[in-house]
Amino acid sequence: MGDLHNLFGRVNEVHVFLEDDEPNGFYIEEALSGSRIADVIEGVQYQQEDLCRKMKTQIDAATRKDQVKPREGVRLLELYESQMLNKTYLNIEPKGGRKKKA
């Protein structure tokens, strides 16, 4: 599933080994992070900084038209920038979502 042609990049991966001696019958040896959104975007000739600047321009225009409240615009831009830098496409959580601890 992970590949640049579909903009997923490398997906998160874990190495799981079956082991009868483990309480759950397996153990996770290693967890590998997938490609960050910014890395995938840059791999197809877009620049993360430019996209963030364009997003800010759109949010500012929506704020001037009173389609977005200023505080909400700031929150949206911060979310966009943080997701771009820190997340992969497949681990973005919905609003209020939580990850379960293994």
Image (cartoon, rainbow, N blue to C red):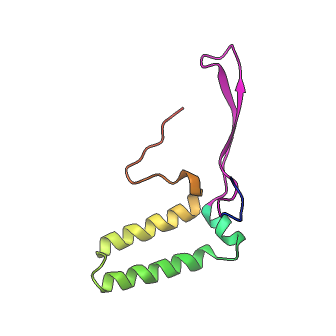
Where is residue 65? Give x, y as percent. Answer: 30, 86
| Left or right: 79, with 8 as reference point | left
Where is residue 15? Give x, y as percent. Answer: 71, 35
Q: Farthest residue toward the top?
A: 21
Magenta residues (range): 7-36
Asked if the magenta segment contains residue 17, the reply would be: yes
Task: Count all numbered tags in the image, as a single digit.
Answer: 0
Quadrant position of the C terminus in the picture: top right
Q: Relative to the observer, which residue lies in front, 4 or 34?
A: 4
Q: Relative to the observer, which residue lies in front, 78 or 88?
A: 88
| Left or right: 19, with 84 as reference point | right
* Up-down relation of residue 92 to residue 41 (above or below): above
Asked if the magenta segment contains residue 33, the reply would be: yes
* Up-down relation of residue 43 to residue 15 (above or below): below
**Residue 32: quarter of image:** top right
What's the residue at 39%, 54% (across, down)? Answer: 95
Where is residue 35? Give x, y as percent. Answer: 67, 57
What's the residue at 71%, 19% (across, down)? Answer: 19
**Residue 64: quarter of image:** bottom left
